[in-house]
């Protein structure tokens, strides 16, 4: 995984509540077994008319050139529905490293963290402040400080993250990498407790 420490970026707003994993990546695209290539089908049914890539929906933010960045900002209860890990794969493959919402479904949240995507949960009020910004506004997410800031206004909020997952994200570790990073301590423990 790629390490994530501080990201300053414009954001893509999708001000819709209860976005489920079938909207994030429809079930018909779950046949692949590697993580690559899912980004082109992110929000597929919302992005295109009649599932036709030649007919992008002009009113959907991913199709609007004024929106770009590594941060996706979505309405409350993001990632509900089925537990498919492909939802996290598609978000990452599209180019998002951070998803901001006022509530995440637990399974999606864990899948995101396991795949190098930082779910930043803020209050409903702070989320609405972000949605109220224009398309040039940048957000800064500082994982070490656990803060998100609207750069144009200076408004800032904290967010929670499991300390183990924070360590993994700061260093770009998956679970195996984390174990390997502690191999010397593990070997020392094994030799001192079993000698």
Image: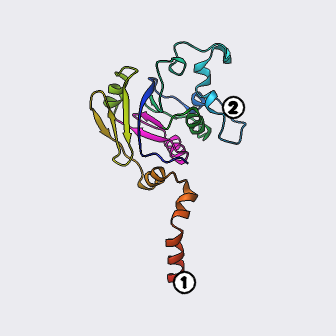
> Residue 54, image x and y in percent?
67, 14
> Residue 11, image x and y in percent?
43, 28
Whether tag 1 and tag 2 are in contact, CB under 8 A, the answer is no
Res 75 seen here: no
Which quadrant of the view contains residue 47?
top right
Residue at the image position 48 percent from the left and 25 percent from the top: 68
Mark sitting on residue 194: 1
Res 157 seen here: yes
Mark sitting on residue 182: none
Query: Reading the chain from its start, which is encountered first: label 1 or label 2?
Result: 2
> Start and end of the magenta stretch?
98-122
SS for dot 1: loop
Furthest toward the left, the residue is 154
Mark sitting on residue 29: 2
SS for dot 2: helix
> Residue 30, image x and y in percent?
69, 35
Furthest toward the right, the residue is 31
Within-10-Å neighbours for mark 1: few <14, some 14–19, many 20+: few
Q: Please say whether residue 21 is one of the residues in the magenta stretch.
A: no
Quarter containing the C terminus: bottom right
Q: Please say whether residue 105 is one of the residues in the magenta stretch.
A: yes
Q: Nearer the viewer, residue 5 or 99?
A: 5
Task: Look at the picture and state if 68 lies above or below 115.
Answer: above
In the picture, measured across the screen, residue 53 lies left or right of residue 95, that is: right
> Residue 176, image x and y in percent?
58, 59
Residue at the image position 64 percent from the left and 13 percent from the top: 55
Residue at the image position 66 percent from the left and 18 percent from the top: 53
Q: Nearer the viewer, residue 78 or 8?
A: 8
Within-10-Å neighbours for mark 2: few <14, some 14–19, many 20+: some
In the picture, measured across the screen, residue 165 lies left or right of residue 134, that is: right
């Amino acid at each position: 995984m790629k390490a994530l420490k501080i990201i300053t970026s414009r954001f893509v707003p999708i001000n819709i509540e209860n976005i489920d994993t079938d909207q994030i990546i429809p079930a018909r695209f779950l046949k692949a077994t590697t993580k690559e290539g899912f980004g082109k089908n992110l929000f597929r049914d919302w992005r295109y008319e009649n599932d036709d890539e030649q007919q992008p929906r002009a009113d959907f933010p991913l199709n609007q050139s004024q929106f770009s960045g590594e941060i996706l900002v979505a309405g409350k209860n993001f990632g509900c529905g089925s537990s498919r890990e492909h939802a996290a794969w598609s978000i990452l493959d599209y180019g998002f490293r951070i998803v901001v919402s006022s509530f995440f479904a637990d399974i999606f949240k864990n899948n995101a963290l396991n795949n190098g995507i930082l779910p930043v949960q803020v209050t409903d009020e702070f989320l609405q402040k972000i949605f109220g910004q224009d398309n040039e506004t940048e957000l800064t997410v500082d994982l070490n400080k656990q803060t998100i800031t609207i750069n144009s206004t200076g408004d800032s909020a904290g967010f929670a993250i499991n300390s183990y997952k924070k360590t993994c994200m700061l260093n770009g570790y998956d679970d195996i990498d984390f174990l390997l990073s502690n191999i010397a301590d593990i070997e020392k423990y094994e030799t001192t407790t079993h000698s």
